[in-house]
Image (cartoon, rainbow, N blue to C red):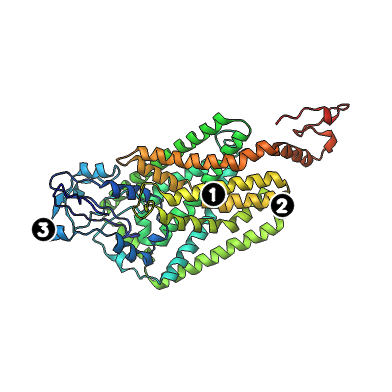
Amino acid sequence: MDIGTADSEPRRSGSFSCTSSANSSLRRRSISLSAAAPVHIDDDIESEIVSEAGDIGDRALHSNRNSESSSHRFSGDHALENGLSAPISGDTLLHLNKYWSRDPPTMTTISVVTPLPKEIVSPLSTDAIVCSKDKKQDDKERLPKLLDYAFCLIHLAVFGILGVLTRYVLQKLFGPGVAGLTNDENILYLDLPSNMVGSFLMGWWGIVFKADISSVSDYLAIGLSTGYLGSLTTFSGWNQKMLDLIVDGHWVLAVLGFLVGLFLAAYSIIFGIETAKAFRWLLTRQNACTGSGTPSSSSNWRVDSFKRHLAVMVALILMLGLLWGVCGALLREDFSSGSSGAQLWLACFVGPPGVWIRWFLARLNGRGLGRAGLFKWVPFGTLAANVSAACIMAALSTVKKAVNSQNCDTVASGIQLGFLGCLSTVSTFIAEFNAMRESEHPWRAYAYALITVCISFGLGILIYSVPVWTKGYGCMDRMALADSDHLPQDQTSSYGHPIPVGISPSNLPITL
């Protein structure tokens, strides 16, 4: 893409990029430098920034960076020949990004060949862009492409399973059995706590401290943000609970459920960012008082050699084998009972493929449509993952009602909890929403949310709600409830309640 190439307005323009240690050539933050205008971000560049705020998939791997940078690097030869530079003030940095540091030492003159100071951290990207004179990150031993992918997939699998387990625990903790704050019959749906917690942690691990985590291990950063937080949160479960509400005729509650869910998740990530910034400030002040620096203290933990990579990989493979082994044994024991535990153990098996597919789809973020790259501000990778997961979730819910058997319910619910819960995400979605809201075009955030919700909810109505309304699956569920209560069929109403003696079931009205 070109910046400032209009022939009618001759001017000197160049660009520079500040990249994180995790994505040194991908996370481009180009700023147009013009003698006639203040520093600003080109609209096309900003669209790409906000679209890539949540995840960029396998484009973040070292083995894919050279080709990416060669095809997207902006030319600065003319600027270099003329020694182009421009002073960047604190107000300008805050204008470019609300959360960039305003520390006086960072307000300096920056040229096209000078990296941005280390303390300038952007929350517009989950890669938490940090530029530094420290070149240790570039000295990390690079892995072959096959091992690069294998390492990342294993990290995603392990952290994805941990995300599923955490989501299940939060469902039980805040659900009707314990705290009783959430349930399936109102706007406080069962997955709301996990979506809020995941969005909050996204502000910590996926934005403010992402660069610090990447300095230790790039794979750990991907595993935490994409694997754990992406699996801890789920958009498909949120959408399905709203579909269940409209099936029962609660349209207003469904609309409120989407609004409340979006509001709480959006403010959870803001609260996470602000608290993480405060914690970082405390750490910086403590290090300044003690004279210790974080780079030296964290260097011992860096996974920057083949031996360390191999050790971490072996540990994660053993952990993955242990998790799958335990889940397999428990699934064999609980499957016949059809309990929620059986659904959880099956979910741990099918969860990792959902994470992998979402991670691969994330490479579409920031690309736009077609060769022209239309609508780059729309994260099409995240959008495709959430919409497809919501549709499959609705289809499985329809199958459960149609088949109406214990084994079908266990398998379908396990796939919904694991595979579809990991395929969809709220943490990445809300990070992109927050980046758009803080950009020069805040309306894009609400347009993106509306597009995601309307497409998912609309298709869900066609796939799930319409068959339930037309086929009368609601009555079949109530009859199944009667069977579960061990009451004779001819002594139970269509709602599962006992029929008074002397009244024939055929005389009872059935209301759909």
Which one is nearer the viewer's eye here, 91 or 2?
Answer: 2
Q: Are marks 3 and 2 in contact (CB under 8 Å)?
A: no
Q: Which mark identifies residue 113?
A: none
Q: Which mark identifies residue 82?
A: 3
Say which element carries label 1.
helix
Instruction: Give the image quarter of residue 274.
Output: top left
- In this rendering, the label closer to the viewer, 3 or 2: 3
Q: Say whether residue 434 is left or right of residue 353.
A: left
Q: Which residue is mark 2?
A: 407
Q: Amino acid at mark 1?
A: Ala
Say which element carries label 2.
helix
Q: Is residue 233 visible?
A: no
Q: Are marks 2 and 1 in contact (CB under 8 Å)?
A: no
Q: Is residue 23 visible?
A: yes
* Residue furthest left as drawn: 82
Residue 125 in the image: x percent, y percent? Answer: 35, 50
Residue 310 in the image: x percent, y percent? Answer: 45, 71
Q: Are marks 1 and 3 in contact (CB under 8 Å)?
A: no
Query: Residue at image x 60%, y 54%?
Result: 347
Q: Residues within 10 Å of mark 1 (few under 14, many from 20)?
A: many
Which one is nearer the viewer's eye here, 115 or 432?
Answer: 432
Q: Which residue is mark 1?
A: 389
Q: Amino acid at mark 3?
A: Asn
